[in-house]
Image: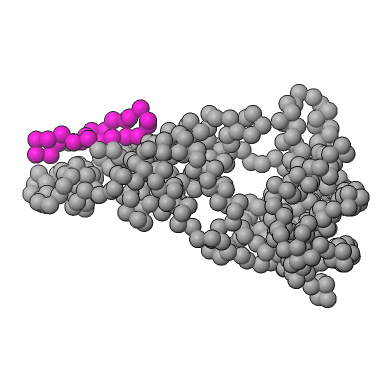
């Protein structure tokens, strides 16, 4: 009564006849099992029509869609085809109130959606983009080159698809497109687990074996974490540069704060009397502009910051070069790179090494997991496990205790 065939995109289509007319409709899936379920539903509906238990309503505009839906859709969905992908992207960003999202989040979304505009074409009607089109996007995107000359990573594609999902929900809420897209039907490349963090000598030993490209060597240094002595040595080196970078990196080293949290922090956030700093978060709760977490202040950090505040440029921000002006992320990156240039610390891939070094040192000292998570602001188990590891010599010591 009904037949299935598979389009070259991988999406199944169903064909059937009603009242002497043949219909072809998409099953909106690349899975044979799901398509078979659609086929069973269509055949059941056709059987009910044939026996007179079900009649096609007079106001049905699309008989094919009505049959595929099992007799539930009574009118053809209407969408304004004038709303192209570019129209929706422009309207989306125009609708976001100031402060609703961080500048970094907005920049990331623009980068993601620019890829969709390039591959799917900005002139494409938003309602024409379904499973097949998004599957084509994933295939093309996975073949493109990303950073360090390698293909775009699966995790990057996953994040881009999340951004597109946000855009489509925005369009659907305004009646510019209809129905939902089953993301489970879109196949993406499998991601690899991030490599474990390593200490300096482990990375050097791995590189010394040879055979690694420059990109692969940089990947290894991305996994570097520093021991306590190395953290203190690095801070002592940065102190000689005599810039705002020293107190900023000290905050990262002694609290595990993110760079963005440090740059937006204010002097009033540091309560030396009670030994507490309040960090202003942006990532933990996306329904709020800012959330807060409390971290205890280490005595070394208190000493560093009291000295810095005594000679502060002025204004409310913790680190700055002029009063009441936030240091931009790109300036923070440039200042870091300039400071480490020509030294052994050029191996450090940025501020974040101090954040996961802090978490590693906490774990090594045997601090409770709840305490580390509270200080670090970790929300998911994957994030917790990423930072829960011991130094290699400690693990070797534990192994040596077996079979004694």
Q: Does the rendering let one see residue 368?
A: no
Image coordinates for residue 149, horizontal then vertical, percent: 64, 29
Image coordinates for residue 327, horizontal then vertical, percent: 72, 55
Q: Does the rendering let one see residue 178?
A: yes
Residue displayed at 16% across by 44% down: 63
Region in magenta = 2-24
Q: Residue furthest bottom?
A: 273
Return the residue nearer the eye: 294 or 394.
Answer: 294
Using residue 46 as the reference point, say whether residue 232 is left or right of it.
right
Quadrant, the N terminus: top left
Residue displayed at 49% across by 57% down: 96
Residue displayed at 57% across by 34% down: 152
| Magenta segment includes 20 | yes
Image coordinates for residue 130, horizontal then vertical, percent: 36, 41
Using residue 296 as the reference point, say whether residue 175 is left or right of it.
left
Using residue 138 as the reference point, say whether residue 340 is left or right of it.
right
Give the colour scheme of this rendering: one colour
Q: Is residue 336 above or below residue 101?
A: above
Image coordinates for residue 286, horizontal then vertical, percent: 55, 60
Residue displayed at 46% across by 54% down: 94
Q: Is residue 152 above or below residue 199?
A: above
**Overall secondary structure of the magenta stretch?**
strand
Return the residue nearer the eye: 172 or 359.
Answer: 172
């Amino acid at each position: 009564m009904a037949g299935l065939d598979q389009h070259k995109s991988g999406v199944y289509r169903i064909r059937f006849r009603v009242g002497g007319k043949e219909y072809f409709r998409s099953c909106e899936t690349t899975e044979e099992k799901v398509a078979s379920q659609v086929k069973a539903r269509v055949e059941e509906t056709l059987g009910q029509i044939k026996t007179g238990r079900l009649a096609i309503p007079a106001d049905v505009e699309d008989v094919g869609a009505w049959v595929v839906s099992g007799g539930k859709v009574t009118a053809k969905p209407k969408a304004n085809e004038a709303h192209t992908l570019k129209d929706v992207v422009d309207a989306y960003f125009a609708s976001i109130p100031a402060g609703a999202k961080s500048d970094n989040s907005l920049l990331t979304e623009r980068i993601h959606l620019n890829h969709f505009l390039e591959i799917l074409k900005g002139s494409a009607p938003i309602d024409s983009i379904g499973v097949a089109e998004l599957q084509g996007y994933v295939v093309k995107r996975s073949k493109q080159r990303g950073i360090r000359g390698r293909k775009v990573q699966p995790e990057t594609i996953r994040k881009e698809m999340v951004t597109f999902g946000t855009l489509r929900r925005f369009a659907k809420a305004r009646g510019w497109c209809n129905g939902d897209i089953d993301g489970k039907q879109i196949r993406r490349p499998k991601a690899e687990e991030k490599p474990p963090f390593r200490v300096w000598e482990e990375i050097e030993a791995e590189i010394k074996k040879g055979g690694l490209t420059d990109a692969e060597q940089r990947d290894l240094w991305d996994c570097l974490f520093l021991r306590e002595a190395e953290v203190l040595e690095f801070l002592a080196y940065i102190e000689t540069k005599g810039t705002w970078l020293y107190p900023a990196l000290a905050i990262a080293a002694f609290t595990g704060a993110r760079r963005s949290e440090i740059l937006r922090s204010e002097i009033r956030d540091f309560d030396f009397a009670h030994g507490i700093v309040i960090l202003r978060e942006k990532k933990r709760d996306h329904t709020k502009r800012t959330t807060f977490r409390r971290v205890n202040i280490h005595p070394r950090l208190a000493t560093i910051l009291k000295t810095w505040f005594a000679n502060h440029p002025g204004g409310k921000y913790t680190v700055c070069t002029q009063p009441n002006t936030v240091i931009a992320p790109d300036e923070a990156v440039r200042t870091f790179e300039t400071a480490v240039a020509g030294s052994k610390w050029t191996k450090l891939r940025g501020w974040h090494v101090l954040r996961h070094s802090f978490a590693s040192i906490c774990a090594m000292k045997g601090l409770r997991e709840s305490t580390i998570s509270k200080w670090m602001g970790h929300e998911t188990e994957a994030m917790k496990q990423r930072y829960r590891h011991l130094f290699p010599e400690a693990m070797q010591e534990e192994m040596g205790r077996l079979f004694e």
